[in-house]
Amino acid sequence: MAGLLLPNVGGEEYLSLASKKSVHGLFEEQAAKTPDSIAVSFGDERLTYGELNARADSLAAYLRSRGLGRDGVAGIRLERGVPAMVAALGILKAGGAYLPLDPAYPKERLDFMIEDSRASLLIDADLPVQPGVPTGVSSDPEDLAYVIYTSGSTGKPKGVAMPHRPLLNLLAWQESVLPGPARTLQFAPLSFDVSFQEMFSTWRGGGELVLIADADRRDPARLLSLLASRRIERLFLPFVALQQLAEAAGPVPESLRDVITAGEQLRITPRIVEFFEKLPGCSLHNHYGPSETHVVTAYTLQGPPAGWPPLPSIGRPIANTRIHLLEGELHVAGESLCRGYLYRPEMTAARFIPNPFEPPPSLLYKTGDLARFLPDGNIEYLGRSDDQVKIRGVRVELGEIETRLAHHPAVGEVVVVVRDGRLAAYIKPRADAPSAEELRRHLREALPEHFIPSTFTFLERLPLTPSGKIDPLALPVPRVSHAPVHFESERERGIAAIWQEVIGAAPGRDDNFFDVGGDSLRVNEVHRKLLAAFGGDFPVTALFEHTTIRALAAFLAPDSEAPQLSAAISERAQKQKAVLARKRLSRSMA
Protein backbone atom coordinates (compact mmCIF):
# COMPACT_ATOMS: atom_id res chain seq x y z
CA MET A 1 0.00 0.00 0.00
CA ALA A 2 1.39 3.38 -0.99
CA GLY A 3 0.16 6.91 -1.11
CA LEU A 4 1.42 10.19 -2.45
CA LEU A 5 0.72 13.66 -1.10
CA LEU A 6 0.44 16.38 -3.73
CA PRO A 7 0.66 20.18 -3.39
CA ASN A 8 -2.73 21.84 -3.16
CA VAL A 9 -4.23 24.03 -5.85
CA GLY A 10 -4.36 27.57 -4.49
CA GLY A 11 -2.83 26.45 -1.22
CA GLU A 12 -0.53 29.45 -0.82
CA GLU A 13 -3.38 31.93 -1.19
CA TYR A 14 -5.77 29.91 0.95
CA LEU A 15 -7.29 31.84 3.85
CA SER A 16 -8.54 29.72 6.75
CA LEU A 17 -12.20 29.93 7.64
CA ALA A 18 -11.68 28.10 10.91
CA SER A 19 -13.32 30.96 12.79
CA LYS A 20 -16.46 30.63 10.66
CA LYS A 21 -19.28 28.49 11.92
CA SER A 22 -21.65 28.05 9.02
CA VAL A 23 -22.30 28.57 5.32
CA HIS A 24 -25.24 30.88 6.03
CA GLY A 25 -22.96 32.92 8.30
CA LEU A 26 -20.84 33.73 5.24
CA PHE A 27 -23.95 34.87 3.40
CA GLU A 28 -24.96 37.08 6.32
CA GLU A 29 -21.52 38.72 6.28
CA GLN A 30 -21.89 39.53 2.59
CA ALA A 31 -25.46 40.79 3.06
CA ALA A 32 -24.18 43.21 5.70
CA LYS A 33 -21.51 44.49 3.29
CA THR A 34 -23.65 44.86 0.16
CA PRO A 35 -27.33 44.91 1.22
CA ASP A 36 -28.45 46.78 -1.92
CA SER A 37 -26.63 44.63 -4.49
CA ILE A 38 -28.66 42.10 -6.49
CA ALA A 39 -28.26 38.62 -4.98
CA VAL A 40 -30.63 36.58 -7.16
CA SER A 41 -32.75 37.17 -10.25
CA PHE A 42 -35.25 35.15 -12.27
CA GLY A 43 -36.70 36.89 -15.29
CA ASP A 44 -38.01 40.24 -14.06
CA GLU A 45 -37.89 39.18 -10.39
CA ARG A 46 -34.89 40.42 -8.39
CA LEU A 47 -33.90 40.30 -4.73
CA THR A 48 -31.09 42.28 -3.16
CA TYR A 49 -28.84 40.72 -0.55
CA GLY A 50 -30.79 42.55 2.14
CA GLU A 51 -34.15 41.33 0.79
CA LEU A 52 -33.00 37.74 0.37
CA ASN A 53 -31.55 37.77 3.88
CA ALA A 54 -34.81 39.12 5.33
CA ARG A 55 -36.96 36.55 3.50
CA ALA A 56 -34.69 33.72 4.62
CA ASP A 57 -34.82 35.01 8.22
CA SER A 58 -38.62 35.05 8.05
CA LEU A 59 -38.71 31.47 6.78
CA ALA A 60 -36.17 30.37 9.38
CA ALA A 61 -38.31 31.84 12.17
CA TYR A 62 -41.31 29.91 10.86
CA LEU A 63 -39.35 26.67 10.53
CA ARG A 64 -37.98 27.05 14.06
CA SER A 65 -41.54 27.48 15.33
CA ARG A 66 -42.36 24.16 13.65
CA GLY A 67 -39.53 22.42 15.50
CA LEU A 68 -36.69 22.43 12.96
CA GLY A 69 -33.30 22.62 14.64
CA ARG A 70 -29.73 21.31 14.48
CA ASP A 71 -29.37 18.33 12.15
CA GLY A 72 -33.08 18.37 11.42
CA VAL A 73 -33.90 17.69 7.77
CA ALA A 74 -36.43 19.71 5.76
CA GLY A 75 -37.36 18.80 2.18
CA ILE A 76 -37.57 21.29 -0.69
CA ARG A 77 -39.97 20.21 -3.45
CA LEU A 78 -40.15 23.34 -5.57
CA GLU A 79 -39.70 24.18 -9.22
CA ARG A 80 -36.80 26.40 -10.25
CA GLY A 81 -37.22 29.91 -8.94
CA VAL A 82 -36.46 32.38 -6.18
CA PRO A 83 -38.60 30.53 -3.57
CA ALA A 84 -36.28 27.50 -3.82
CA MET A 85 -33.26 29.72 -3.10
CA VAL A 86 -35.05 31.30 -0.11
CA ALA A 87 -35.98 27.82 1.13
CA ALA A 88 -32.41 26.48 1.06
CA LEU A 89 -31.02 29.55 2.83
CA GLY A 90 -33.90 29.65 5.33
CA ILE A 91 -33.46 26.01 6.31
CA LEU A 92 -29.77 26.60 6.96
CA LYS A 93 -30.53 29.71 9.02
CA ALA A 94 -32.95 27.66 11.12
CA GLY A 95 -30.08 25.29 11.92
CA GLY A 96 -31.36 22.47 9.73
CA ALA A 97 -30.23 20.66 6.58
CA TYR A 98 -32.06 20.93 3.27
CA LEU A 99 -33.12 17.89 1.26
CA PRO A 100 -33.60 18.63 -2.48
CA LEU A 101 -36.62 16.81 -3.93
CA ASP A 102 -36.85 17.18 -7.70
CA PRO A 103 -40.57 17.51 -8.61
CA ALA A 104 -39.84 15.60 -11.83
CA TYR A 105 -38.84 12.47 -9.89
CA PRO A 106 -41.37 9.65 -9.49
CA LYS A 107 -43.54 9.84 -6.37
CA GLU A 108 -42.24 6.48 -5.14
CA ARG A 109 -38.66 7.76 -5.17
CA LEU A 110 -39.56 11.06 -3.50
CA ASP A 111 -41.56 9.26 -0.80
CA PHE A 112 -38.59 6.98 -0.11
CA MET A 113 -36.20 9.93 0.23
CA ILE A 114 -38.52 11.77 2.61
CA GLU A 115 -39.01 8.68 4.79
CA ASP A 116 -35.39 7.53 4.66
CA SER A 117 -34.02 10.97 5.61
CA ARG A 118 -36.60 11.31 8.41
CA ALA A 119 -37.44 14.77 7.12
CA SER A 120 -39.71 16.52 9.59
CA LEU A 121 -40.89 19.29 7.25
CA LEU A 122 -41.61 19.66 3.54
CA ILE A 123 -41.57 22.98 1.68
CA ASP A 124 -43.60 22.62 -1.50
CA ALA A 125 -44.95 26.17 -1.79
CA ASP A 126 -43.69 29.73 -1.32
CA LEU A 127 -44.63 30.13 2.33
CA PRO A 128 -46.31 33.43 3.27
CA VAL A 129 -44.38 33.91 6.51
CA GLN A 130 -44.18 37.07 8.60
CA PRO A 131 -40.98 39.04 9.29
CA GLY A 132 -39.00 37.61 12.15
CA VAL A 133 -35.55 36.67 13.31
CA PRO A 134 -34.72 33.11 14.42
CA THR A 135 -33.50 32.87 17.98
CA GLY A 136 -31.48 30.28 19.81
CA VAL A 137 -29.81 28.86 16.68
CA SER A 138 -26.38 27.45 17.48
CA SER A 139 -24.10 26.93 14.49
CA ASP A 140 -21.24 24.47 14.30
CA PRO A 141 -19.14 23.39 11.30
CA GLU A 142 -20.10 19.77 11.99
CA ASP A 143 -23.84 20.48 11.73
CA LEU A 144 -25.56 19.05 8.66
CA ALA A 145 -26.02 21.49 5.75
CA TYR A 146 -27.74 19.28 3.18
CA VAL A 147 -28.63 15.68 2.36
CA ILE A 148 -28.40 14.70 -1.33
CA TYR A 149 -29.43 11.25 -2.51
CA THR A 150 -27.32 9.35 -5.01
CA SER A 151 -27.94 6.11 -6.86
CA GLY A 152 -27.31 2.94 -4.85
CA SER A 153 -25.98 -0.41 -6.05
CA THR A 154 -28.32 -2.21 -3.63
CA GLY A 155 -31.35 -0.90 -5.50
CA LYS A 156 -32.08 1.95 -3.09
CA PRO A 157 -30.69 5.50 -3.21
CA LYS A 158 -28.46 6.57 -0.33
CA GLY A 159 -28.33 9.95 1.37
CA VAL A 160 -24.99 11.76 1.49
CA ALA A 161 -24.85 13.66 4.80
CA MET A 162 -22.84 16.82 4.11
CA PRO A 163 -21.93 19.12 7.04
CA HIS A 164 -20.87 22.77 6.85
CA ARG A 165 -17.15 22.07 7.38
CA PRO A 166 -16.28 20.67 3.91
CA LEU A 167 -18.44 23.32 2.27
CA LEU A 168 -16.69 26.14 4.14
CA ASN A 169 -13.39 24.73 2.94
CA LEU A 170 -14.66 24.56 -0.65
CA LEU A 171 -15.92 28.16 -0.58
CA ALA A 172 -12.66 29.46 0.91
CA TRP A 173 -10.61 27.61 -1.71
CA GLN A 174 -12.75 28.85 -4.59
CA GLU A 175 -12.56 32.41 -3.27
CA SER A 176 -8.77 32.14 -3.39
CA VAL A 177 -8.60 30.93 -7.00
CA LEU A 178 -11.64 32.75 -8.48
CA PRO A 179 -11.92 35.94 -6.41
CA GLY A 180 -14.38 38.77 -6.77
CA PRO A 181 -18.07 39.05 -7.60
CA ALA A 182 -19.38 37.28 -10.69
CA ARG A 183 -22.76 37.10 -12.38
CA THR A 184 -23.31 33.34 -12.28
CA LEU A 185 -25.88 31.19 -14.06
CA GLN A 186 -27.70 28.68 -11.85
CA PHE A 187 -27.73 25.71 -14.26
CA ALA A 188 -27.69 22.60 -12.06
CA PRO A 189 -30.84 21.18 -10.43
CA LEU A 190 -30.94 21.68 -6.67
CA SER A 191 -30.62 17.89 -6.30
CA PHE A 192 -27.14 18.01 -7.92
CA ASP A 193 -24.36 19.07 -5.54
CA VAL A 194 -22.90 21.59 -8.01
CA SER A 195 -25.96 23.75 -7.31
CA PHE A 196 -24.53 24.50 -3.86
CA GLN A 197 -21.33 25.77 -5.45
CA GLU A 198 -23.28 27.90 -7.91
CA MET A 199 -25.36 29.47 -5.16
CA PHE A 200 -23.03 30.02 -2.25
CA SER A 201 -19.76 30.73 -4.06
CA THR A 202 -21.65 33.46 -5.94
CA TRP A 203 -23.12 34.92 -2.75
CA ARG A 204 -19.81 34.63 -0.87
CA GLY A 205 -18.21 36.83 -3.54
CA GLY A 206 -21.06 39.35 -3.67
CA GLY A 207 -22.19 38.34 -7.17
CA GLU A 208 -25.59 37.88 -8.77
CA LEU A 209 -27.12 34.42 -9.16
CA VAL A 210 -29.16 34.28 -12.39
CA LEU A 211 -31.88 31.62 -12.46
CA ILE A 212 -33.32 30.22 -15.69
CA ALA A 213 -36.42 28.28 -16.65
CA ASP A 214 -36.10 24.61 -17.56
CA ALA A 215 -37.10 25.40 -21.15
CA ASP A 216 -34.09 27.72 -21.49
CA ARG A 217 -31.82 25.24 -19.72
CA ARG A 218 -32.70 22.42 -22.12
CA ASP A 219 -32.39 24.46 -25.33
CA PRO A 220 -28.70 25.16 -26.14
CA ALA A 221 -29.52 27.95 -28.60
CA ARG A 222 -31.74 29.77 -26.12
CA LEU A 223 -29.19 29.17 -23.37
CA LEU A 224 -26.42 30.66 -25.50
CA SER A 225 -28.54 33.72 -26.21
CA LEU A 226 -29.37 34.10 -22.52
CA LEU A 227 -25.69 33.94 -21.55
CA ALA A 228 -25.02 36.86 -23.88
CA SER A 229 -28.09 38.96 -23.01
CA ARG A 230 -27.68 38.56 -19.23
CA ARG A 231 -23.92 39.14 -19.40
CA ILE A 232 -23.13 35.90 -17.54
CA GLU A 233 -19.55 35.80 -16.25
CA ARG A 234 -19.33 32.38 -14.57
CA LEU A 235 -20.89 29.11 -15.67
CA PHE A 236 -20.91 25.61 -14.14
CA LEU A 237 -22.10 22.73 -16.33
CA PRO A 238 -21.31 19.09 -17.21
CA PHE A 239 -19.38 18.14 -20.34
CA VAL A 240 -22.48 17.08 -22.31
CA ALA A 241 -24.11 20.47 -21.77
CA LEU A 242 -20.86 22.26 -22.65
CA GLN A 243 -20.63 20.29 -25.90
CA GLN A 244 -24.24 21.16 -26.77
CA LEU A 245 -23.57 24.82 -26.02
CA ALA A 246 -20.47 24.80 -28.22
CA GLU A 247 -22.49 23.34 -31.10
CA ALA A 248 -25.36 25.83 -30.78
CA ALA A 249 -25.74 28.74 -33.17
CA GLY A 250 -26.08 32.12 -31.53
CA PRO A 251 -24.32 35.20 -30.16
CA VAL A 252 -20.90 34.80 -28.56
CA PRO A 253 -21.25 35.33 -24.79
CA GLU A 254 -18.26 37.68 -24.59
CA SER A 255 -18.88 38.37 -20.88
CA LEU A 256 -17.89 34.82 -19.88
CA ARG A 257 -14.74 34.74 -17.72
CA ASP A 258 -14.86 31.23 -16.23
CA VAL A 259 -16.50 27.98 -17.32
CA ILE A 260 -16.30 25.18 -14.76
CA THR A 261 -17.12 21.64 -15.81
CA ALA A 262 -17.62 18.63 -13.53
CA GLY A 263 -19.60 15.42 -13.19
CA GLU A 264 -17.98 13.39 -15.98
CA GLN A 265 -14.85 13.09 -18.12
CA LEU A 266 -14.09 16.36 -19.91
CA ARG A 267 -13.28 15.92 -23.61
CA ILE A 268 -11.84 18.69 -25.75
CA THR A 269 -13.69 18.35 -29.05
CA PRO A 270 -13.21 20.51 -32.16
CA ARG A 271 -16.42 22.43 -31.34
CA ILE A 272 -15.24 23.19 -27.81
CA VAL A 273 -11.92 24.43 -29.21
CA GLU A 274 -13.79 26.72 -31.62
CA PHE A 275 -16.04 27.97 -28.81
CA PHE A 276 -13.17 29.01 -26.55
CA GLU A 277 -11.14 30.47 -29.43
CA LYS A 278 -13.99 33.01 -29.72
CA LEU A 279 -13.62 33.77 -25.98
CA PRO A 280 -9.94 34.63 -25.43
CA GLY A 281 -10.70 36.09 -21.99
CA CYS A 282 -12.48 32.97 -20.70
CA SER A 283 -10.83 30.12 -18.74
CA LEU A 284 -11.97 26.49 -18.70
CA HIS A 285 -11.65 24.69 -15.35
CA ASN A 286 -12.05 20.93 -14.88
CA HIS A 287 -13.28 19.96 -11.38
CA TYR A 288 -13.49 16.45 -9.95
CA GLY A 289 -15.22 15.17 -6.85
CA PRO A 290 -17.96 12.69 -5.91
CA SER A 291 -21.03 13.75 -3.94
CA GLU A 292 -19.41 12.37 -0.77
CA THR A 293 -16.69 15.05 -0.93
CA HIS A 294 -17.86 17.70 -3.39
CA VAL A 295 -14.86 19.15 -5.30
CA VAL A 296 -11.47 17.65 -4.36
CA THR A 297 -9.24 18.32 -7.39
CA ALA A 298 -9.08 21.05 -10.04
CA TYR A 299 -7.27 21.72 -13.29
CA THR A 300 -7.29 24.92 -15.36
CA LEU A 301 -6.45 24.47 -19.04
CA GLN A 302 -3.59 26.66 -20.18
CA GLY A 303 -2.53 28.20 -23.49
CA PRO A 304 -4.38 28.37 -26.82
CA PRO A 305 -7.43 26.05 -27.00
CA ALA A 306 -6.06 24.32 -30.11
CA GLY A 307 -3.25 22.93 -27.93
CA TRP A 308 -5.44 21.61 -25.11
CA PRO A 309 -5.19 17.85 -24.48
CA PRO A 310 -8.13 15.75 -25.78
CA LEU A 311 -8.72 14.27 -22.30
CA PRO A 312 -7.60 16.80 -19.70
CA SER A 313 -6.41 15.63 -16.30
CA ILE A 314 -8.43 16.27 -13.15
CA GLY A 315 -5.53 18.27 -11.74
CA ARG A 316 -4.36 18.53 -8.13
CA PRO A 317 -6.07 18.55 -4.74
CA ILE A 318 -7.78 21.70 -3.54
CA ALA A 319 -6.69 23.30 -0.26
CA ASN A 320 -6.77 21.13 2.89
CA THR A 321 -7.54 18.03 0.82
CA ARG A 322 -5.19 15.09 0.27
CA ILE A 323 -5.29 12.47 -2.50
CA HIS A 324 -3.85 8.96 -2.14
CA LEU A 325 -3.79 6.23 -4.79
CA LEU A 326 -4.05 2.79 -3.24
CA GLU A 327 -3.63 0.00 -5.81
CA GLY A 328 -4.77 2.46 -8.46
CA GLU A 329 -7.96 3.54 -6.67
CA LEU A 330 -8.34 7.20 -5.77
CA HIS A 331 -8.84 7.88 -2.04
CA VAL A 332 -9.60 11.27 -0.46
CA ALA A 333 -8.54 12.57 2.97
CA GLY A 334 -8.76 15.93 4.69
CA GLU A 335 -11.43 18.59 5.07
CA SER A 336 -13.54 17.53 2.10
CA LEU A 337 -15.15 14.40 3.53
CA CYS A 338 -18.84 14.29 4.39
CA ARG A 339 -20.10 12.50 7.50
CA GLY A 340 -21.03 9.41 5.53
CA TYR A 341 -24.36 7.96 4.43
CA LEU A 342 -27.39 8.97 6.45
CA TYR A 343 -28.51 6.11 8.73
CA ARG A 344 -26.26 3.63 6.83
CA PRO A 345 -23.45 2.84 9.31
CA GLU A 346 -22.32 -0.37 7.58
CA MET A 347 -22.19 1.28 4.15
CA THR A 348 -20.37 4.26 5.65
CA ALA A 349 -17.78 2.01 7.32
CA ALA A 350 -17.15 0.22 4.00
CA ARG A 351 -16.40 3.40 2.07
CA PHE A 352 -14.90 5.63 4.78
CA ILE A 353 -11.93 3.65 6.07
CA PRO A 354 -9.16 4.41 8.62
CA ASN A 355 -6.39 6.53 7.13
CA PRO A 356 -3.07 4.63 7.45
CA PHE A 357 -1.07 7.81 6.73
CA GLU A 358 -2.46 9.99 9.52
CA PRO A 359 -3.38 9.46 13.18
CA PRO A 360 -7.02 8.68 14.13
CA PRO A 361 -9.71 9.76 13.63
CA SER A 362 -8.55 10.63 10.10
CA LEU A 363 -10.40 8.70 7.40
CA LEU A 364 -9.98 7.94 3.70
CA TYR A 365 -12.95 7.94 1.35
CA LYS A 366 -12.77 5.13 -1.24
CA THR A 367 -14.10 6.76 -4.41
CA GLY A 368 -14.13 3.66 -6.63
CA ASP A 369 -12.45 5.76 -9.32
CA LEU A 370 -9.23 4.58 -10.93
CA ALA A 371 -6.45 7.09 -11.55
CA ARG A 372 -2.71 7.55 -11.92
CA PHE A 373 -0.21 10.33 -11.25
CA LEU A 374 1.23 12.02 -14.33
CA PRO A 375 4.88 13.13 -14.52
CA ASP A 376 3.85 16.76 -13.98
CA GLY A 377 2.11 15.86 -10.71
CA ASN A 378 -1.45 16.09 -12.04
CA ILE A 379 -3.90 13.20 -11.79
CA GLU A 380 -5.30 11.32 -14.78
CA TYR A 381 -8.78 9.82 -14.37
CA LEU A 382 -8.97 6.25 -15.71
CA GLY A 383 -12.58 5.22 -15.13
CA ARG A 384 -14.46 3.16 -12.56
CA SER A 385 -13.56 0.00 -10.70
CA ASP A 386 -17.24 -0.99 -10.45
CA ASP A 387 -20.53 -0.68 -12.35
CA GLN A 388 -21.17 2.96 -11.53
CA VAL A 389 -21.54 5.24 -14.55
CA LYS A 390 -22.38 8.88 -15.23
CA ILE A 391 -25.36 9.68 -17.43
CA ARG A 392 -25.68 13.39 -18.29
CA GLY A 393 -23.31 14.13 -15.44
CA VAL A 394 -25.40 12.30 -12.82
CA ARG A 395 -24.24 9.20 -10.96
CA VAL A 396 -26.13 6.03 -11.94
CA GLU A 397 -25.57 2.65 -10.33
CA LEU A 398 -26.46 -0.01 -12.88
CA GLY A 399 -27.38 -2.31 -10.00
CA GLU A 400 -30.23 0.00 -9.03
CA ILE A 401 -31.78 -0.29 -12.49
CA GLU A 402 -31.24 -4.06 -12.56
CA THR A 403 -32.86 -4.47 -9.14
CA ARG A 404 -35.93 -2.51 -10.20
CA LEU A 405 -36.27 -4.48 -13.44
CA ALA A 406 -35.95 -7.76 -11.52
CA HIS A 407 -39.04 -6.78 -9.50
CA HIS A 408 -41.16 -7.10 -12.65
CA PRO A 409 -42.91 -10.52 -12.55
CA ALA A 410 -42.05 -11.31 -16.18
CA VAL A 411 -38.31 -10.64 -15.79
CA GLY A 412 -35.96 -13.48 -14.95
CA GLU A 413 -32.28 -12.59 -15.31
CA VAL A 414 -31.27 -9.07 -16.22
CA VAL A 415 -28.14 -7.03 -16.87
CA VAL A 416 -27.82 -3.35 -17.78
CA VAL A 417 -24.74 -2.01 -19.57
CA VAL A 418 -23.68 1.22 -21.25
CA ARG A 419 -23.28 1.22 -25.03
CA ASP A 420 -22.29 4.38 -26.93
CA GLY A 421 -23.20 6.51 -23.94
CA ARG A 422 -26.67 4.99 -23.62
CA LEU A 423 -28.16 2.49 -21.19
CA ALA A 424 -29.02 -0.89 -22.70
CA ALA A 425 -30.98 -3.61 -20.84
CA TYR A 426 -30.67 -7.34 -21.62
CA ILE A 427 -33.35 -9.60 -20.20
CA LYS A 428 -34.04 -13.31 -19.99
CA PRO A 429 -37.84 -13.37 -19.49
CA ARG A 430 -39.57 -15.91 -17.24
CA ALA A 431 -42.11 -16.87 -19.90
CA ASP A 432 -43.56 -14.47 -22.47
CA ALA A 433 -41.40 -11.42 -22.88
CA PRO A 434 -43.00 -8.16 -21.70
CA SER A 435 -43.03 -5.23 -24.06
CA ALA A 436 -40.32 -2.61 -23.82
CA GLU A 437 -42.97 0.04 -23.09
CA GLU A 438 -44.34 -2.04 -20.21
CA LEU A 439 -40.86 -2.22 -18.68
CA ARG A 440 -40.35 1.52 -19.17
CA ARG A 441 -43.62 2.20 -17.32
CA HIS A 442 -42.47 -0.13 -14.54
CA LEU A 443 -39.14 1.71 -14.19
CA ARG A 444 -40.70 5.18 -14.35
CA GLU A 445 -42.75 4.40 -11.26
CA ALA A 446 -39.55 4.51 -9.19
CA LEU A 447 -36.63 5.89 -11.22
CA PRO A 448 -35.81 9.27 -12.80
CA GLU A 449 -35.96 9.55 -16.58
CA HIS A 450 -32.18 9.38 -17.06
CA PHE A 451 -32.21 5.90 -15.43
CA ILE A 452 -34.46 4.46 -18.17
CA PRO A 453 -32.58 2.28 -20.71
CA SER A 454 -32.80 3.32 -24.35
CA THR A 455 -33.09 -0.29 -25.55
CA PHE A 456 -34.40 -3.61 -24.20
CA THR A 457 -33.08 -6.82 -25.73
CA PHE A 458 -34.70 -10.17 -24.85
CA LEU A 459 -32.50 -13.27 -24.92
CA GLU A 460 -33.09 -16.98 -24.31
CA ARG A 461 -30.03 -16.90 -22.06
CA LEU A 462 -27.50 -14.32 -20.96
CA PRO A 463 -23.91 -15.12 -22.06
CA LEU A 464 -21.61 -16.22 -19.24
CA THR A 465 -17.86 -16.23 -18.67
CA PRO A 466 -16.12 -19.54 -17.76
CA SER A 467 -16.44 -18.52 -14.11
CA GLY A 468 -20.22 -18.27 -14.42
CA LYS A 469 -20.56 -14.48 -14.44
CA ILE A 470 -22.44 -12.55 -17.09
CA ASP A 471 -20.08 -11.68 -19.94
CA PRO A 472 -20.82 -8.10 -21.07
CA LEU A 473 -18.47 -8.43 -24.06
CA ALA A 474 -20.60 -11.25 -25.47
CA LEU A 475 -23.88 -9.32 -25.32
CA PRO A 476 -25.28 -8.60 -28.80
CA VAL A 477 -25.58 -5.09 -30.18
CA PRO A 478 -29.11 -3.81 -29.41
CA ARG A 479 -31.40 -3.80 -32.42
CA VAL A 480 -34.73 -2.10 -32.94
CA SER A 481 -36.78 -3.72 -35.66
CA HIS A 482 -40.17 -2.81 -37.06
CA ALA A 483 -42.60 -4.10 -39.61
CA PRO A 484 -42.63 -2.13 -42.88
CA VAL A 485 -43.77 1.40 -42.12
CA HIS A 486 -46.13 3.43 -44.27
CA PHE A 487 -45.44 7.15 -43.96
CA GLU A 488 -48.10 9.64 -44.98
CA SER A 489 -45.87 12.31 -46.49
CA GLU A 490 -42.40 13.25 -47.61
CA ARG A 491 -42.13 15.20 -44.34
CA GLU A 492 -42.61 12.04 -42.30
CA ARG A 493 -40.15 10.10 -44.44
CA GLY A 494 -37.60 12.91 -44.08
CA ILE A 495 -38.01 13.07 -40.30
CA ALA A 496 -37.63 9.28 -40.12
CA ALA A 497 -34.38 9.52 -42.11
CA ILE A 498 -33.01 12.09 -39.66
CA TRP A 499 -34.03 9.98 -36.67
CA GLN A 500 -32.35 6.91 -38.11
CA GLU A 501 -29.23 8.89 -38.95
CA VAL A 502 -28.98 10.15 -35.35
CA ILE A 503 -30.09 7.16 -33.26
CA GLY A 504 -29.09 4.31 -35.54
CA ALA A 505 -32.49 2.60 -35.49
CA ALA A 506 -35.32 2.48 -38.02
CA PRO A 507 -38.28 4.17 -36.30
CA GLY A 508 -41.98 3.58 -36.76
CA ARG A 509 -44.48 6.33 -37.41
CA ASP A 510 -45.80 6.34 -33.86
CA ASP A 511 -42.63 5.38 -31.99
CA ASN A 512 -41.62 7.70 -29.16
CA PHE A 513 -38.21 9.21 -29.94
CA PHE A 514 -37.01 8.60 -26.39
CA ASP A 515 -38.12 4.96 -26.50
CA VAL A 516 -36.05 4.02 -29.56
CA GLY A 517 -32.69 5.33 -28.40
CA GLY A 518 -33.16 9.09 -28.29
CA ASP A 519 -31.95 11.19 -25.37
CA SER A 520 -31.35 14.84 -24.49
CA LEU A 521 -28.01 14.93 -26.34
CA ARG A 522 -29.39 13.40 -29.52
CA VAL A 523 -32.55 15.50 -29.46
CA ASN A 524 -30.38 18.57 -29.92
CA GLU A 525 -28.69 16.94 -32.92
CA VAL A 526 -32.10 16.15 -34.42
CA HIS A 527 -33.14 19.75 -33.79
CA ARG A 528 -30.16 21.12 -35.72
CA LYS A 529 -30.78 18.80 -38.66
CA LEU A 530 -34.49 19.64 -38.78
CA LEU A 531 -33.74 23.36 -38.82
CA ALA A 532 -31.27 22.85 -41.67
CA ALA A 533 -33.74 20.71 -43.60
CA PHE A 534 -36.97 22.68 -43.10
CA GLY A 535 -35.71 26.19 -42.46
CA GLY A 536 -37.63 28.48 -40.15
CA ASP A 537 -37.13 28.42 -36.40
CA PHE A 538 -38.65 26.56 -33.47
CA PRO A 539 -37.30 25.71 -29.97
CA VAL A 540 -35.77 22.35 -29.17
CA THR A 541 -38.37 21.99 -26.39
CA ALA A 542 -40.94 21.32 -29.14
CA LEU A 543 -39.26 17.95 -29.68
CA PHE A 544 -40.01 17.02 -26.07
CA GLU A 545 -43.69 17.75 -26.73
CA HIS A 546 -44.01 16.15 -30.19
CA THR A 547 -42.14 12.88 -29.70
CA THR A 548 -43.45 10.79 -32.61
CA ILE A 549 -42.88 11.20 -36.33
CA ARG A 550 -46.61 11.65 -36.91
CA ALA A 551 -46.90 14.39 -34.24
CA LEU A 552 -43.67 16.12 -35.25
CA ALA A 553 -44.63 16.24 -38.93
CA ALA A 554 -47.98 17.78 -38.02
CA PHE A 555 -46.25 20.35 -35.81
CA LEU A 556 -43.68 21.28 -38.44
CA ALA A 557 -46.20 21.60 -41.24
CA PRO A 558 -49.84 22.16 -40.27
CA ASP A 559 -52.14 21.81 -43.27
CA SER A 560 -52.81 25.53 -43.49
CA GLU A 561 -49.15 26.45 -43.92
CA ALA A 562 -47.22 23.35 -44.89
CA PRO A 563 -43.60 24.19 -45.81
CA GLN A 564 -41.92 22.37 -48.65
CA LEU A 565 -39.47 19.66 -47.76
CA SER A 566 -35.99 20.83 -48.64
CA ALA A 567 -33.90 19.12 -51.30
CA ALA A 568 -31.41 18.15 -48.60
CA ILE A 569 -33.91 16.16 -46.59
CA SER A 570 -35.37 14.53 -49.70
CA GLU A 571 -31.91 13.44 -50.75
CA ARG A 572 -31.24 12.07 -47.25
CA ALA A 573 -34.50 10.13 -47.31
CA GLN A 574 -33.68 8.59 -50.71
CA LYS A 575 -30.20 7.61 -49.54
CA GLN A 576 -31.63 6.02 -46.39
CA LYS A 577 -34.16 4.04 -48.39
CA ALA A 578 -31.35 2.77 -50.62
CA VAL A 579 -29.32 1.71 -47.59
CA LEU A 580 -32.29 -0.16 -46.12
CA ALA A 581 -32.97 -1.82 -49.47
CA ARG A 582 -29.37 -3.07 -49.65
CA LYS A 583 -29.64 -4.41 -46.09
CA ARG A 584 -32.88 -6.28 -46.91
CA LEU A 585 -31.27 -7.73 -50.05
CA SER A 586 -28.21 -8.80 -48.05
CA ARG A 587 -30.38 -10.55 -45.44
CA SER A 588 -32.45 -12.32 -48.12
CA MET A 589 -29.28 -13.72 -49.71
CA ALA A 590 -27.75 -14.82 -46.39
Image: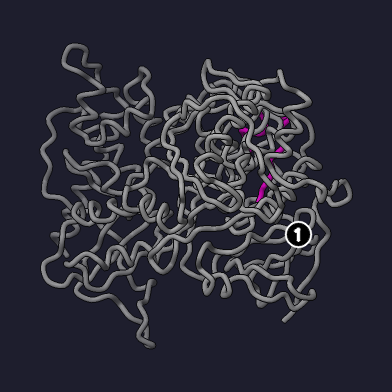
Q: Nearer the viewer, residue 433 or 30?
A: 30
- Residue 77 seen in render: yes
Dot 1 corresponds to which residue? 321
For the residue pair 125 and 283, the one nearer the viewer reads as: 125
| Position of residue 360 measured from the top left corner of the image (x, y, whole percent) | 76, 75
Q: Nearer the viewer, residue 43 or 414?
A: 43
Magenta region includes residue 285:
yes
Identified at 12% across, 42% down, the residue is 485
The magenta span reads 273-287
Residue under the point 24% across and 23% down: 555
What is the total number of numbered labels drawn onto the structure image?
A: 1
Left or right for 212, reference 262: left
Q: In the rendered structure, which amino acid carries the disc numbered 1? A: Thr
Where's the N terminus, which quadrant? bottom right
Residue 254 seen in the current view: no
Instruction: Give residue 205's quadrant in the image.
Output: top right
Residue 56 against residue 67 in the figure, above or below: above
Q: Point out residue 105 in the picture as x, y percentages from the top left corner.
A: 37, 46
Q: Is residue 57 left or right of residue 206?
A: left
Image x and y of residue 318, in percent: 76, 53
